């Protein structure tokens, strides 16, 4: 039953009187809008689940305390520990494409903090700027968290995170549509400074508060990094990143000629997708500079639309090579398009310094 979504778990428990309360003690709370015909059904179900689950935990505690005189301290301690374990909640996963009321969000967050959950995943629209932003503050200092996945949708205003995400046990993190706060009014944000165990990070459609600021991504053991639709320049201070993925446009970087502040020689596997709204020489220069920053890669995956901009470069392919001296595998994804006329020129240009690399066209 641990592997069932919460709605299915509740439905299963109806089949037997002996099972009727089992769902209240499952380690995972997983509720998604896709399993409900209407938004109000989703909200009512989530509210009842949170309410009855907490009542069940309180009921166990009250029973034990009521008969505490019958037990010595050692036995009582064991009973209490067993009660805590049997109702322990480890994971909360809630997704809704609509608006979730602040009171319901508050219940969910309080439940996560009370049970010291290890995984917290929430995707929802936020209607009330002040209350909803403050509600999530406690999540960013929940030291038990090992996995954090937040996707926020708003009506134009920013969801600002604290300057520092104080989650020392965090290993996997995915943040969508949030704004990082500057560190002590400096020109950069360093939100992951205290996340010493962070190994996988996804930053999707995020930015740094203020104009022309830098997002510093740090991590002593960070090994996998995905950046999508990032609106600010990025500095990566994570020497053990081996897998890197980028998807987005370069419009916001046109005044700097670079997406990244420094070379990233430590990256071994990379996947790059550039979205050209209208390719021009300046944007293509940024793309070439990005490839030079990761020129030490061994495996590279490029989407053809990313390479189309090279046709804007004067004298292409007779220009300075990227310098892929360690490249072992190059994959170009066409997505069922006809073979482009300049494909061979592009392949030969990229592989000038790695002529023996494996070539794949998909």
Image (cartoon, rainbow, N blue to C red):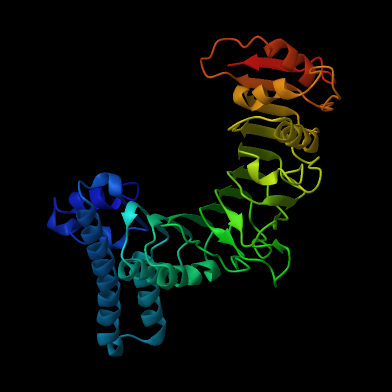
Closer-to-camera residue (229/263): 229
- Spot occupied by residue 308 in the image (x, y as percentages of width and height): 65, 22
Closer-to-camera residue (189/93): 189
Instruction: Please give the name of the residue rendered at 50% of the width and 71% of the height, measured from the top-left corner.
Output: 137
Figure check: 69 above or below 179: below
Figure check: 36 above or below 57: above
Closer-to-camera residue (131/219): 131
Residue furthest bottom in the image? 69
- Spot occupied by residue 28 in the image (x, y as percentages of width and height): 37, 56
Instruction: Please give the name of the residue rendered at 71% of the width and 11% of the height, measured from the top-left corner.
Output: 344
Asked if residue 353 can be seen in this view, the reply is yes
- Spot occupied by residue 17 in the image (x, y as percentages of width and height): 13, 58
**Snapshot quadrant of residue 60:** bottom left
Closer-to-camera residue (45/116): 45
- Spot occupied by residue 219 in the image (x, y as percentages of width and height): 70, 55
Image quadrant containing the C terminus:
top right
Asked if residue 67 can be seen in this view, the reply is no
Q: In this view, does 99 lie to the left or right of 165?
A: left
Instruction: Please give the name of the residue rendered at 67% of the width and 39% of the height, measured from the top-left corner.
Output: 243
**Snapshot quadrant of residue 196:** bottom right
Q: Is residue 41 left or right of residue 88?
A: left
Figure check: 80 above or below 293: below
Instruction: Please give the name of the residue rendered at 73% of the width and 68% of the height, measured from the top-left corner.
Output: 186
């Amino acid at each position: 039953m641990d592997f069932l979504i919460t709605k299915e778990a509740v439905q299963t428990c109806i089949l037997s009187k002996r099972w009727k309360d089992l769902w209240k003690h499952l380690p995972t709370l997983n509720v998604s809008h896709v399993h409900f015909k209407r938004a109000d059904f989703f909200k009512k179900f989530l509210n009842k689940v949170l309410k009855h689950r907490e009542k069940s935990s309180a009921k166990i505690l009250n029973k034990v305390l009521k008969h505490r005189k019958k037990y010595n301290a050692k036995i009582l301690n064991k009973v209490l520990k067993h009660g805590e374990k049997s109702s322990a909640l480890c994971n909360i996963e809630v997704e809704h494409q609509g608006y979730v009321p602040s009171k319901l969000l508050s219940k969910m967050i309080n439940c996560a903090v009370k049970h010291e959950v290890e995984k917290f995943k929430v995707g929802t629209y936020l209607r009330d700027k002040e209350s909803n932003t403050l509600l999530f503050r406690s999540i960013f200092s929940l030291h038990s968290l090992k996995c954090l996945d937040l996707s926020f949708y708003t009506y134009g205003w920013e969801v600002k995170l604290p300057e520092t995400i104080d989650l020392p046990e965090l290993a996997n993190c995915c943040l969508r549509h949030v704004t990082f706060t500057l560190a002590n009014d400096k020109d950069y944000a360093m939100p992951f400074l205290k996340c010493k165990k962070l190994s996988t990070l996804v930053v999707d459609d995020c930015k740094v508060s203020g104009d022309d600021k830098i997002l510093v991504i740090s991590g002593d053991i960070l090994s996998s990094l995905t950046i999508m639709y990032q609106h600010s320049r990025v500095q990566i201070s994570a020497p053990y990143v081996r897998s890197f993925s980028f998807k987005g446009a370069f419009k916001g970087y046109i005044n700097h000629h670079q997406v990244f502040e420094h070379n990233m020689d430590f990256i071994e596997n990379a996947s790059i997708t550039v979205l050209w709204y209208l390719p021009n020489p300046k944007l293509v220069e940024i793309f070439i500079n990005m490839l030079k920053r990761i020129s030490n890669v061994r495996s590279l995956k490029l989407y053809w639309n990313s390479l189309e901009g090279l046709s804007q470069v004067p004298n292409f392919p007779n220009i300075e090579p990227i310098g892929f001296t360690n490249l072992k595998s190059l994959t170009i994804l066409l997505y069922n398009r006809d073979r482009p006329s300049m494909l061979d020129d592009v392949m030969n240009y990229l592989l000038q310094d790695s002529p023996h690399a494996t070539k794949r066209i998909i």
